[in-house]
Amino acid sequence: MTETESTTVVRGACPHDCPDTCALLTTVENGRAVKVQGNPDHPMTDGVLCTKVARYAERTYHPDRIQQPLKRVGPKGSGQFQPVSWDEALDDIAMRLTAIAQRDPEAILPYSYAGTMGQVQGEGMAARFFHKLGASLLDRTICASAGAEALTYTLGNKLGMKMEFFAESRLIVIWGSNSIGSNLHFWRLAQDAKRQGAKLVCIDPRRSETAEKCHEHLAIRPGTDAALALALMHELIVHNWLDLDYIERHTQGWDALRERALQWPPERAAQVCGIKVAQIQSLARDYGTTTPAAIRLNYGMQRVRGGGNAVRAIACLPALVGAWRHRGGGLLLSSSGHFPVQRAALQRPDLLGERRPRTLNMSTIGDDLLRPASTEFGPRIEALVVYNSNPVAVAPESGKVVQGFAREDLFTVVLEHFQTDTADHADYILPATTQLEHWDIHTSYGHTDVLLNQPAIPPVGQARTNTDIFRALAARMGFGEPCFADDDLTLCRTVMGDEALFARLQQQGFAALPVLDAPFAQGGFPTPSGKCEFFSPRLAAMGQDGLPDHVPNYEAPSEAFPLAMISPPARNFLNSSFVNVTSLRAIEVEPVLEIHADDAHQRGIQNGDVVKVFNARGEYHCKAEVSRRARPGVVHGLGIWWRKMGLNGTNVNQLTSQHLTDIGRAPVFYDCAVQVASLKGPHG
Ligand SMILES: Nc1nc2c(c(=O)[nH]1)N[C@H]1C(S)=C(S)[C@@H](COP(=O)(O)OP(=O)(O)OC[C@H]3O[C@@H](n4cnc5c(=O)[nH]c(N)nc54)[C@H](O)[C@@H]3O)O[C@H]1N2
Ligand SMILES: Nc1nc2c(c(=O)[nH]1)N[C@H]1C(S)=C(S)[C@@H](COP(=O)(O)OP(=O)(O)OC[C@H]3O[C@@H](n4cnc5c(=O)[nH]c(N)nc54)[C@H](O)[C@@H]3O)O[C@H]1N2
Ligand code: SF4
Ligand SMILES: [Mo]
């Protein structure tokens, strides 16, 4: 070791959109991050990271990392850029945004999601900037709003079981989640429970890595979860496997729900779901007679038209059997409602003053970019500022999204690590820091710990933090409020508004929130009635069904498009992130469509054939994998590849629609009918 050599270990948090929110330890040698590992002191992380984030250093120092501001030189979407200085880029962007804002600030739209889940590099300074500007507001629906709103109508907030207590459950129903791929640390707890004798049941159209390791797998048709839940209720009722005391004290709308459920004998649901009557009966018996019984619900099952109703139906189940009485019983969809985030102090909606800009739904960005000005819509979108998201790859109906982003009269700024499909369409690409290079505070939607992320290395190249970029733009646009001078540490302190907690975070890197072990053991649901609302007066007042029901998919299989396509994540990517990381792409190899042998045979498709997957919205080419993971009638287009890395320059979202869910205005990625043809075969 020379005198200048040094090794430090820096505590951080995984920034990704994943319920596990792991605590990281980054080893830094001579100013360079050499290793990213899980923090063994953090109970939920337990020293283990997923394959993706174990490669975070590879991603950070990737040769394709954008290291300086880039300005477009070719036509929109051609991906041709030249380097410019920060001053030149920021001056020009500030000037262009100011000119548009002088006509109408609502013609400017921020577009962001969960590239980082950090409170500070997420909507910290960005929200302040867009509020002050008076830009259109963005309805961030692309992932979870159907389930989150449905859960809130039913339980009162995004609350549920503590993840650690799944280890004590005797029955775990993993519902619409491939936990091994997307909730690894929960799976570890489920394994603990299994070793103690718990039964694991998976409900998923796909025989996922998780489904094949459970005791039972109910491979239902996509979008039929509410029918299954109602049939389970039917069985609980007719066999009297109910906790009538809990129902009496802590629920609202039981008589009406009972009547609804009695219309769903298992025979009816079995038809709808495409499974055996006995499978429903057996799950109902297990659920009605095992204590404690737990449901790990996840967002995979709410990406269909009836996603909100399905979450409501499932969220009623624990109250019916009194599962909430035990800390190892109940349900977990999201824990994010436990965190007392000081959103107003952080994001400063007061900077809007009297203005009430329109709200645009991120899930219909395709249509909205192509809409002319009108009285209902307001001004045409003239400028987009994209950060923490890759909409050209991840938003539905990408044919339209691409057409919108390709508008020559649209001014687009993209803050990014890499030249994604979206960045290809930018006027300016601004190099952003990664999690190893900035401060942040992380809450979680899986567990109930807060984490602090400390920067481990200086910014790579000329990268700047999202916050710093918005601060610099604010200064150039003359935003004089002192809040635009807040540094990132100040923003971190603002998030929880609790100095004692922050001191603990600085010491330890994480801190557990004081959360009840069994949050609804004594009822106390944070709904208006204080009960678990089987019947929701709020939904009824909006003209919706106040009771949960089965709402069929928009796209029933038809003669032209007879197959239901779902597009769940590929295990080694995170949405469209990591697709460009060579070692991870090497595991996924190429875009794949899983298809059942019968469906393949009917179409003359052999394993490994290049196939065309298509519907009225477009076509997508990929490799067919004739697979036991697929049930007949359902195909799986594993996501989410970068379009430019696909076989014909598209990805699976070329086929998905811009329809929205029943509750929560969310996209219906898994409600999508398609046809498949071999490109070698007669249809090619
Ligand atoms: N490795 C990896 N991890 C991830 C992600 C990733 O891309 N890769 N994405 C992250 C993000 S953004 C999120 S939101 C979470 C998502 O987390 P989850 O919602 O748990 O998503 P998945 O694990 O994909 O599980 C979805 C499962 O739902 C199944 N499914 C599809 N349609 C239906 C249906 O109609 N009913 C039922 N019962 N099941 C259905 C799919 O086949 C899939 O196996 O995961 C996060 N974690
Ligand atoms: N067909 C289909 N489509 C889907 C889904 C599906 O299951 N099927 N899943 C949907 C879901 S659940 C989600 S959540 C969305 C996800 O959609 P997005 O939130 O857009 O997620 P990513 O594709 O991971 O893109 C995030 C981008 O943010 C960038 N980024 C990360 N950190 C930072 C940072 O600190 N600063 C800046 N400036 N940039 C950063 C990354 O480089 C990456 O390109 O996709 C949705 N789309
Ligand atoms: S993506 Fe999830 S499992 Fe992987 S390190 Fe991040 S939080 Fe942990
Ligand atoms: Mo998501």
Image: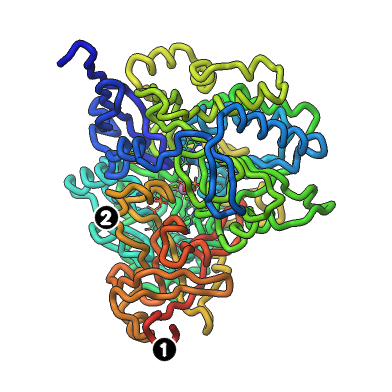
Q: Is residue 254 above or below residue 161?
A: below
Q: Could you tell me if residue 647 is visible in this image?
A: yes
Q: Could you tell me if residue 450 is visible in this image?
A: no
Q: Position of residue 617 (x, y in %)?
A: 58, 70
Between 74 and 556, the residue placed more toward the observer is 74
Between 333 and 323, the residue placed more toward the observer is 333
Indicate the quadrant containing the N terminus: top left, top right, bottom left or bottom right: top left
At mark 2, the secondary structure is helix
Q: Label for residue 59?
A: none
Are circles 2 and 1 on residues that touch, CB within 8 Å? no
Number of other residues with Cα within 10 Å of mark 2, as a class: few under 14, some 14 to 19, many 20 or more: few
CA separation in Å, label 2 and label 1: 31 Å
Amino acid carrying mark 2 in the image: Ile
Q: Is residue 127 above or below residue 648?
A: above
Dot 1 beta carbon under 8 Å from ligand 2: no
Which residue is at a point 61% across and 16% down the rendered structure image?
A: 485
Which residue is at a point 76% across and 38% down the rendered structure image?
A: 100
Number of other residues with Cα within 10 Å of mark 1, as a class: few under 14, some 14 to 19, many 20 or more: few
Q: Is residue 353 left or right of residue 521?
A: right
Query: Which of pointers 2 and 1 lies earlier in the amino acid sequence?
Result: 2
Which residue is at a point 55% across and 59% down the rendered structure image?
A: 396
Which residue is the extreme one toward the right?
375
Say which residue label 2 marks: 587
Q: Is residue 512 left or right of residue 304?
A: left
Q: Is residue 444 above or below residue 186?
A: above
Amino acid carrying mark 1 in the image: Pro
Indicate the quadrant containing the C terminus: top left, top right, bottom left or bottom right: bottom left
Q: How is the image coloured?
A: rainbow
Say which residue label 1 marks: 682
